[in-house]
Image (cartoon, coloured by chain):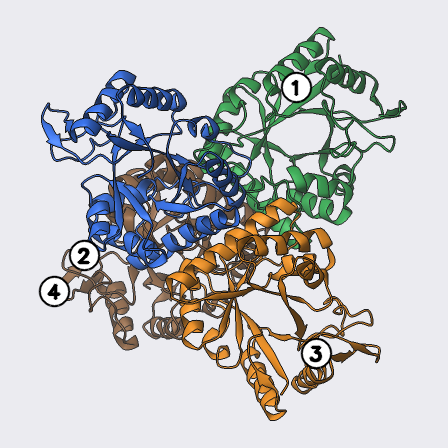
Chain colours: A green, B brown, C blue, D orange
């Protein structure tokens, strides 16, 4: 039986501000990436998110970011490799301790937003991130964009990797995501999203925007939690996977 | 042979701003309390401080604070007990992970500034802090003002406590520190500071501002690292202790 | 014809996080108090809020706070009078310049949250705030809790004051608000809220929780914008005032 | 008589952290650029800096930055033009109001650090900054790197510009500064710094790293205030200018 992980970014509320439908989406996913206070989340939100995920036996991961609350970690910052190494350790340590104090376990790390995107195409940034993860705990799994520097740098130092694909993004012939500035970057249609996921999981290929079929490693599917219809899409994806005899579970 | 711990707050630089004479004072103390990013310190400063302390075999502790960089954690904030519990876990977890990634060990926790002062006289705040420490790691030592709620609440839940006394502060008859607003709060004279310390360590008593001799539990002496003559005082204290056959070492 | 101002706190979104129903509530109020980046709001949210209010000819005011984004300015902080003076000038200056750049005018200042509550009962804090407002622009109106230090300190230095009353809070015999910790602090019922407002506006009295009728100066009514039913209550209040021949407009 | 402006970045202390020798350097310069809280400075430091500069009749300017305290505004951030426009208005407004409350006048704006460097070579960023300055107050002077987009974009919209040159940086044949990563980027020698300044002021030319003499517009000279020998260099430059009959004064 084929199996796949469904992951979702969570714990993105901050102070008095709420974001996402964490409680509902936790019914559909097998892994959550928890914000660590640098782009979203605070100590209280982190604890609450960890407790909720632990109660549902969902795999918990850290979601470290550039330090940019106001920009939600979506703005690239020119930080040195040493600075990136340091802020990644700080953030994953904070979440790890909150898990420990709650009797839960942190099992993976997935970089957030601009840090994820920068590292995917920038080898030294990817290297700094994975070195930080390994220095902290070499048994952690590392989630990264399939076929990107995130995965290759993690493999290089023998971290366990989990290759991520997207339900609602289109792919280009070179295997990269179509940039959001292009009109065909997003798959708006729920049925098309699900079709793409099923193809990726079953055949480990994806059909690109210009119609070619290329290989892609799909070990986890990212569900975006902050979209308005996020919970609905998550439920629909889960249901399709079950109907297709695909097992959902953390890697 | 009598023994005593000398501790100093460190890692209080932040970004481009330097503070303290950490490298020099590390020659004289046996324990350091490392800022965790909420009142001072950042991920890079924390790592550098941990590495330096580890190299000198000095005991490393976390120094959690109210979240107030601009006020350096010296302004009391009315946070709920749950919020305090959460920010303490976040901060000690961050430092603990940085220690772990550097191959060092975090051995104690000492609250900083207004958090320390509030908790010393406010039982629920002290209780929230020590519960956080215990939830994270029940083997940690907990530093607190001698005879205050910090110590009694930690004892109540069986945390190992270390009672702290001050070299440069005077005491009142009820055992509390003379408030800084009073003119006789500080011991400005180096010889008087040393005399007070020696009395506290050797006899476990202190002479109060109105001349009474009262009992005091002295297990660690706090050296203030941000005073201009901090390094000089630290060296002088260390030398006096050695001359008096008192062993210096973390508890 | 009697007239009254209706004010509401606005611009409390921050970065990627939304809060409140600003656009809708602007249809019902005559004044808005705009967050200045210390408890909520950022430069972009501030400009958008100012532009929206200017378009509807609503009076714009600054809503300065303690510096505490994560706590939304609701936690008391022990800042010195000079620090409070300085952060108030900083915040009202920032909003004033954003108004100026948008071709709008800033007309009033109302402290936010814990700063408002502290100053209401603490004369030196109130004095620091009103001195800051006057130092910046002595023609600004100053909104404060009716009968509190906020009003008396502003009057002392000849600032134009606007006495604020609450639609959804009960009053005690000494004229103060019933603390939120008490079960009868809030008026949950829409009809009762409106009855209280009408009494306050028409008779300048309020009926206290123990049934006494006491005098109260009511020049502006605060509508809470972050409550779930805020827009509905604002509309109902506006409609009642119109039906009662009370003119709604900034003072 | 030839005249030149000497400017220095100031007010870069933050909370408990001190930076620079503002009081001394104010004896030598004619203009100061005051940090506005985003990379350095806080409301209290800003007021103190403004008061000190006003007392010495030094021209006061705002020094807006990317929002990055920990990185001191030296890390490039990918912000949208609208975001840059908004944060520039926020910061210059804050300083302007602090000047107003102190009875001083804000006369110019000079972007800081990575914002300055990005805008110098990126037309849309430069355009966003100068539009913000003009929207706030079209009578302000705008300081920018000589011959860069900062100057040309400001001229395009009829802002008064002040072309800045550096005492301690070398120039390349295309008129740009030699990047700091190159070994010959800095002029370490005091005599060479002064010689370069005198040439630039007297002849409006500079000798590049490969020995060519190229034209350069020099209206203000930047003195770096955070270098260890900053005050000494400032004094030496001032003295040389006086000896060479060059008048020092804000433009």
Q: Residue furthest right?
A: A212
Is the same chain shared between marks 1 and 4? Answer: no
Residue beneath disc 4? B212
Q: Helix or strand or loop: what does disc 4 sit on? A: loop
Q: Is residue B152 visible?
A: no
Residue beneath disc 1? A249
Horizontal arrangement in the rendering, residue A108 relative to residue B29 (left or right)? right
Q: Helix or strand or loop: what does disc 3 sit on? A: loop
Residue beneath disc 2? B175
- Position of the N terminus of chain C, as image quadrant, is top left
State if disc 2 and disc 4 touch (CB < 8 Å): no
Q: Chain of mark 4?
A: B
The residue mark sitting in front, 2 or 3, is: 3
Residue beneath disc 3? D187
State if disc 4 and disc 3 touch (CB < 8 Å): no
The residue mark sitting in front, 1 or 4, is: 1
Is the same chain shared between marks 3 and 1? Answer: no
Q: Residues within 10 Å of mark 3 (few under 14, many from 20)?
A: some
Q: Is residue B49 visible?
A: yes
Q: Chain of mark 2?
A: B
Q: Residue at x 73, y 54 (%)?
A: D123
Q: Chain of mark 1?
A: A
Residue C54 horizontal/vertical position (percent): 47, 39
Residue B61 horizontal/vertical position (percent): 44, 52
Q: Helix or strand or loop: what does disc 1 sit on? A: loop
Per the model, the C-alpha gap separating discs 1 and 4 is 69 Å
Q: Chain of mark 3?
A: D
């Amino acid at each position: 039986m084929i199996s796949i992980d469904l992951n979702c970014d969570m714990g993105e509320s901050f102070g008095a501000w709420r974001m996402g439908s964490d409680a509902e989406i936790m019914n559909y996913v097998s892994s959550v990436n928890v914000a660590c206070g640098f782009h979203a989340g605070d100590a209280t939100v982190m604890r609450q998110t960890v407790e909720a995920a632990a109660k549902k036996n969902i795999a918990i991961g850290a979601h470290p970011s550039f330090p940019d609350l106001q920009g939600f970690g979506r703005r690239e910052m020119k930080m040195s490799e040493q600075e990136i190494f340091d802020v990644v350790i700080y953030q994953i340590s904070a979440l790890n301790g909150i898990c420990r104090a709650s009797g839960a376990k942190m099992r993976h790390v997935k970089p957030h937003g601009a840090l994820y995107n920068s590292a995917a195409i920038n080898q030294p940034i990817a290297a700094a991130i994975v070195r930080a993860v390994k220095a902290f705990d070499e048994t952690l799994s590392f989630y990264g964009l399939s076929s990107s520097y995130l995965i290759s740098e993690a493999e290089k130092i023998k971290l366990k990797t989990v290759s991520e694909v997207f339900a609602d993004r289109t792919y280009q012939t070179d295997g990269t995501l179509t940039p959001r500035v292009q009109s065909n970057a997003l798959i708006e249609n729920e049925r098309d999203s699900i079709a793409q996921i099923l193809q990726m999981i079953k055949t480990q290929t994806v059909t690109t925007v210009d119609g070619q079929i290329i290989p892609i490693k799909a070990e986890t599917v990212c569900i975006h939690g902050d979209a308005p219809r996020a919970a609905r899409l998550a439920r629909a994806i889960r249901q399709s996977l079950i109907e297709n005899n695909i097992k959902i579970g953390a890697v």
